[in-house]
Amino acid sequence: MQESYLLKENPTDHHLQSKIHIPLPHQKIEEFCKKNHIQKLSFFGSVLTDQFNEESDVDVMVEFGSHFKPSLFDMVKMENELSLILNNKKIDFKTSKELSRYFRNDIFQNAEVVYVH
């Protein structure tokens, strides 16, 4: 059985200080990821910057296990579920394949990983 890792969950550890501008209920995120076959969950975009505000959506990059191919319906359902976990923030899910080739490398370099299985 593989271990799962929640990253950056200790806000007093300055080496692990998160740039994410919303509260993260780590236990619920871990349960969400396991239930939905998510191998890696990262945040990117404005949620990592001072430009983030109440109207901003939350950009989330997900990687699924090779055995799971989510449908569009599955993705919308997961966005809605994660929205509830994150205090009804609008969620924009992306897989690495869906990222624009023009921004992909920048997103990979700056994304903040919060869950790895």
Image (spheres, grey):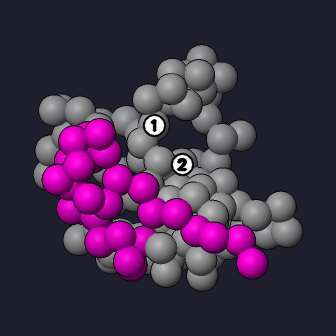
| Residue 65 locus on image (x, y percent) | 76, 64
- In primary-sequence order, the first of circles 2 and 1 is 2
Magenta stretch bounds? 1-29
The residue carrying mark 2 is 61
Q: Are marks 2 and 1 in contact (CB under 8 Å)?
A: yes
Q: Residue at x 29, y 39 (%)?
A: 15
Q: Main secondary structure of the magenta part?
A: loop
The residue carrying mark 1 is 111
The local secondary structure at tag 1 comes to: loop
Front residue of 92/44: it is: 44
The span from disc 2 to disc 1 (Cα, nearest Å) is 8 Å
- In the image as oriented, which residue stretches furthest toward the top? 102
Q: Is residue 22 above or below residue 97?
A: below
Badge 1 density bin: few <14, some 14–19, many ≥20, Cα 10 Å: many
Q: Residue at x 66, y 54 (%)?
A: 63
* Quadrant (top left, top right, bottom left, bottom right) of the N terminus: bottom right
Would residue 27 be counted in the magenta stretch?
A: yes
The local secondary structure at tag 2 comes to: strand
**What's under tag 2, amino acid-wise?**
Met
Would residue 22 be counted in the magenta stretch?
A: yes
